[in-house]
Amino acid sequence: MGSLKVNALRNNTAKVRHLLAILGVAVSAGAVAGEAHEHGKVALTLAIEEGNVEVSWRSPAVNLVGFEHQPKTPEEKQKVEQTLLNLKQGYEQIVLPESALCLLKEADIDTTLAAHTEGHDHDDHDHEEHDDHDHDDHDHEEHDDHGHDDHDHEKHDDHDHDDHDHEKHDDHEEHDHDGHADFSAKYTFECRYPEHLKQIEVNLMPSYPGIDEIRYQAITPAGQTGGSLTQGNTVIVF
């Protein structure tokens, strides 16, 4: 009997993921129409199948943390990390009817900012290339004749900062200004009494005022539907 329940759960989960894949195609098609990475907007998909509920959404990072460049200051890095932790609280972000007795099975949160929150050691990078420049480009005999004291440190510093550092900083700045950053989430619930699943409340907007609209697509036992949520309307009814 236990193995039958496990197999049934796996089958239901597979069905839900298939439904979400279909919805994902619909959202991508909408993005092609000009909705991709639109500040203030969130794209959300919902699928319910025999007590299994999966909610996925994607949002521009600026909606949640106020910026989209890679975090540079400790304050920016902390804000990204705290946002990731807050979003993992699935029961707070996605509210299902208590009578359905839903258990959060998975909260998968990701962002294109997270990989850089530990920073990049520019000092080690610069020093290594600085050493390569010293040994490869200098004439060692001339280096021995003049010594370190006669070497033009001012010109050397100008060379390092103007030719090397600025070029790399320009690359970073171009990436920051031209690139986009997102947050994404997937919440998976298992509900004991799915017949009580008549609505779902999405609590993103009260926590993140940078979001002014959540555009959703849903497949539920009642059928397929779509619409949008706003600050004054955060509940999907089905």
Image: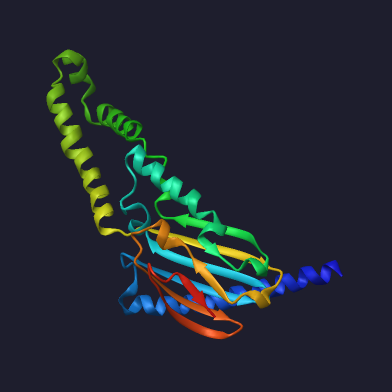
Judge whether 105 appears above or below 217 on screen. above
Judge whether 91 appears above or below 77 on screen. below
Q: In the rendered image, which quarter is residue 136 located in?
A: top left
User: What residue sits 21% from the left and 25% below the top?
Assistant: 139
Question: Which quarter of the image is occupied by the C terminus?
Answer: bottom right
Judge whether 57 appears above or below 177 on screen. below
User: What residue sits 67% from the left and 78% below the top?
Assistant: 195
Colour convention of the picture = rainbow
Query: How far from the left and from the top, in percent, is residue 213?
Result: 36, 70
Q: In the rendered image, which quarter is residue 147 located in?
A: top left
Give the residue furthest to the right: 1
Query: How far from the left and from the top, in percent, is residue 149?
Result: 17, 13
Q: Is residue 32 visible?
A: yes
User: What residue sits 49% from the left and 55% below the top?
Assistant: 87
Question: Which quarter of the image is occupied by the N terminus?
Answer: bottom right
Query: How far from the left and from the top, in percent, is residue 81?
Result: 44, 46
Query: How far from the left and from the top, in percent, is residue 218?
Result: 51, 78
User: What residue sits 43% from the left and 55% below the top?
Assistant: 111
> 218 or 32: nearer the eye?
218
Number of numbered discs on residues: 0
Give the residue furthest to the bottom: 223
Q: Is residue 145 visible?
A: no
> 169 or 180: nearer the eye?
180
Q: In the rendered image, which quarter is residue 164 located in?
A: top left
Q: Is residue 113 left or right of residue 16?
A: left
